[in-house]
Image (cartoon, rainbow, N blue to C red):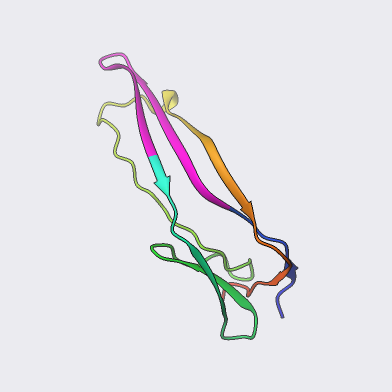
Amino acid sequence: MAPTHRICMIVCIMVLVFSGSIALGIEAINLDVKCSEYRITSGRLGGEVIQMDGFSTNGLPGSPMLPRKVFDVALPPDVNWDSVVVRAQDIEQIVLPGTHDIESAPP
């Protein structure tokens, strides 16, 4: 059985990708990430799974199976990779009430 967790979910985050290039000057790419409502369901092994539309619930085997989403950001082809900075700001978090028996990710 998975350990019991107190869950703090990040429900919205704005990611800024800063890149500097001699040819292009300083540029900022804003990515506003919106999250859907969550629902807690019963998992296959008797624990709980948090589900969100558009998010997967995979993860490293044995780690808590939490919703996650990967965003791809295209940068200019001549970007100077040493100048790329990713900064998260305006993070909104909620704490789910109670404790939850979150299932572990399968092998």
Does the magenta portion include 66?
no
On the image, the x and y values in percent for residue 10 come to 56, 50
Span highlighted in magenta in the image? 10-31
Q: Residue at x 49, y 43 (%)?
A: 13
Q: Nearer the viewer, residue 48 or 98?
A: 98
Q: Quadrant of the C terminus?
A: bottom right
Where residue 56 appears, as percent x and y from the top left, is 44, 66
Left-right relation of 41 to 100: left
Residue 11 is one of the magenta-drawn residues: yes
The rendered magenta stretch, by its main secondary structure, is classed as: strand
- What residue is rendered at 47% in x and 61% in y? 37
- Image side of residue 16 versus residue 91, left or right: left
Quadrant in which residue 106 is drawn = bottom right
Q: Residue at (65%, 72%) from the top-left corner? A: 102
Q: Residue at x 25, y 31 (%)?
A: 77
Task: Find residue 2 and report its horizontal and vertical position in percent.
Answer: 70, 75
